[in-house]
Amino acid sequence: MRVLVTGANGFIGRHVMRAFPPGVEVLSQTHADILSGGCIRPDVVINLAWPPCDYESRQKPQVQQAGTDFACRLWSLCSNRGVKFVGIGSQAEITTPDTPYAVAKRKTRTLLRLACNTAGMPFAWVRVFSVYGPGDCPNTFISYVARELMAGISPSLTDQDVPWDFLHVTDAARAIAAVALSDAVGDFDLGSGQQIGTKEVARLLQAKIAPFVPLGFGHRPARTVEVSALKADISRLQALGWSPQIGISEGLDTLPIANQPQAAIKPKHRTDRSHGTHEYNQRQPVFS
């Protein structure tokens, strides 16, 4: 079997490339090669390619539309080859507040599902929840809190404790590979299936990195819009024989920043809290 992975150099893509068993030929191609019509002939396509997902880019419809356009172009290159198409969605599709990023993901799913059904192509849509791990964007909730603690700085957080579903990227990659290799089609929620409050995650990071650095709960104003509590329904993935193997505490230990000696960390006083808040907001504005 040949599997083509787009976005293979991204956070999740790098792990997906290593998630397949021996005997599966896993390949990647650049955007330029694909858009020029040079797509190889795979049995399965996993489309992990998407424009930058920092906070500012997520608010720009023209940037997010590029992700939809590329996915549709990729489908058109594979539509006469009978391949299985695996698209990658996001928890943003079902969370509040709505964003151009979320709208583009929902639009992409709808277009690909209709196109694949018309062409008789198997289609699966994997809706990714809060994936974390080595190589993640530096301004996700977990990365931000870990980095600030490592610097001896109290991370600026709201006082909200939002239940979220966090999943280690290694488990996420295994799940995507399982979907790709199976005959299953339709929608799949990809998470741990368990909720944990953002405050508890912050405290776990504090205990591992810098127990003496206080967490800045309440240093950022609470959001005026409701923030969604999320829990993935992983029953369809479990039916494929997949289940999460890495718990949150064990997963946090895989972060490079979590393995530094605590004695080297010196508490510091942030004189400009807005700087930390700005950095944090760039990636995950809905996190607590």
Image: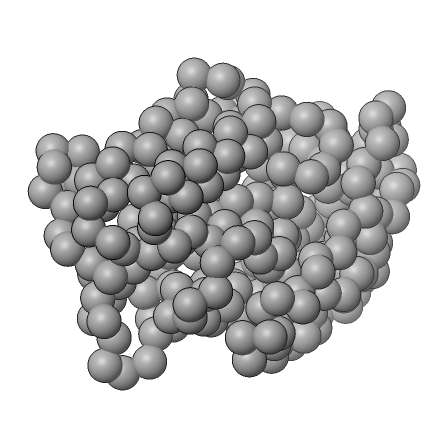
- Relative to 194, is 35 above or below? above
Residue ID at (68%, 33%): 285
Horizontal relation, residue 77 to residue 148: left or right: left
Residue ID at (81%, 47%): 229
Q: Locate the C terminus and report the quarter of the image it occupies.
A: top right
Number of numbered callouts drawn: 0
- Residue 72, located in which quarter of the rendered image? top left
Residue 280 shows up from this direction: no
> Residue 186 location in percent, x, y?
53, 54
> Residue 172 location in percent, x, y?
52, 64
| Residue situated in front as seen by the camera: 152 or 6 | 6
Horizontal relation, residue 229 to residue 262: left or right: right
| Residue situated in front as seen by the camera: 54 or 38 | 38
- Relative to 219, is 59 above or below? above
> Residue 258 location in percent, x, y?
60, 66
Residue 115 shows up from this direction: yes
Horizontal relation, residue 1 to residue 124: left or right: left
Residue ID at (50%, 34%): 110
| Residue situated in front as seen by the camera: 151 or 279 | 279
Residue ID at (63%, 45%): 91
> Residue 119 location in percent, x, y?
32, 42
Q: Locate the N terminus and report the quarter of the image it occupies.
A: bottom left
